Amino acid sequence: MWGIIIAILSGMVMSVQGVFNTGVTKQTGTWLVAAWVQLTGFAVCFLLWLFLEREKVGIPALFQINHKYMLIGGLLGAFITWSVIKSMEGLGPAQAVLLIVIAQVLVAYLLELLGWFEVEKADFSWQKVIGIAIAIAGLIIFKWEK
C-alpha cells in the first residue's frame, strides 16, 4: 500500500516540479535551472543522509558497488530535468507528462523483459502490451482536437 501512495505522490510532485522548472527557465536558462535543481537536490539529499543514514552507510560505499556504470544516475538526472523542462515548454504539462509516463512504462517493461541492469527478468505478457497500447490510445484521444 505504501508503494502505491508513494508512487502517486511521486507523480504529483514530478508534475509540479516540471511546471516550476519550466517557469523559472522563462526568466533564466534551461541549463542554469537544471544545475540549480541538481544542486538543491544534492544539498537536501546530503543533509538527509547526514542525519538519517550516516551511521549505517558511509560515502566510500558508493565506490564499492559491483557495477560502476550505475553511478551515472546524476548525469541521467540532469538530462531528465532538461528534457522535462523542454517537453513541458513545447507540449504543455499534461501532454508532456502523459508522454513521459508512457515512455517510462515502455522502457521499464523492456528492461524487465530483457533483464538488463540487474532487473529481475519477466516473462512476456500480452496483457501488459495491451495496457501500454491503451495508454498510447489514451494519449491520442487526449491530444485529439477538433
Image (cartoon, rainbow, N blue to C red):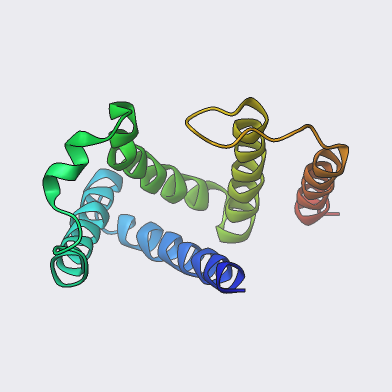
142 lies left or right of 70: right
Q: Position of residue 29 (x, y in %)?
A: 26, 48
65 lies left or right of 9: left
* Front-lying residue, 23 or 18: 18
Q: Position of residue 42 (x, y in %)?
A: 20, 56
* Front-lying residue, 111 or 119: 119
**Quadrant assignment for the N terminus:** bottom right
Query: Image height check: is 23 above or below 127?
Result: below
Q: Residue furthest front?
A: 56
Residue shown at 14% from the left, 63% from the top: 54
Q: Position of residue 103 (x, y in %)?
A: 62, 41
Residue shown at 56% from the left, 56% from the top: 92
Residue shown at 63% from the left, 32% from the top: 121
Residue shown at 26% from the left, 56% from the top: 37
Query: Image height check: is 17 above or below 122?
Result: below
Q: Position of residue 23 (x, y in %)?
A: 37, 63
- The quarter of the picture where residue 145 lies is bottom right
* Front-lying residue, 41 or 122: 122
**Quadrant assignment for the C terminus:** bottom right
Label tally: 0
* Front-lying residue, 6 or 37: 6
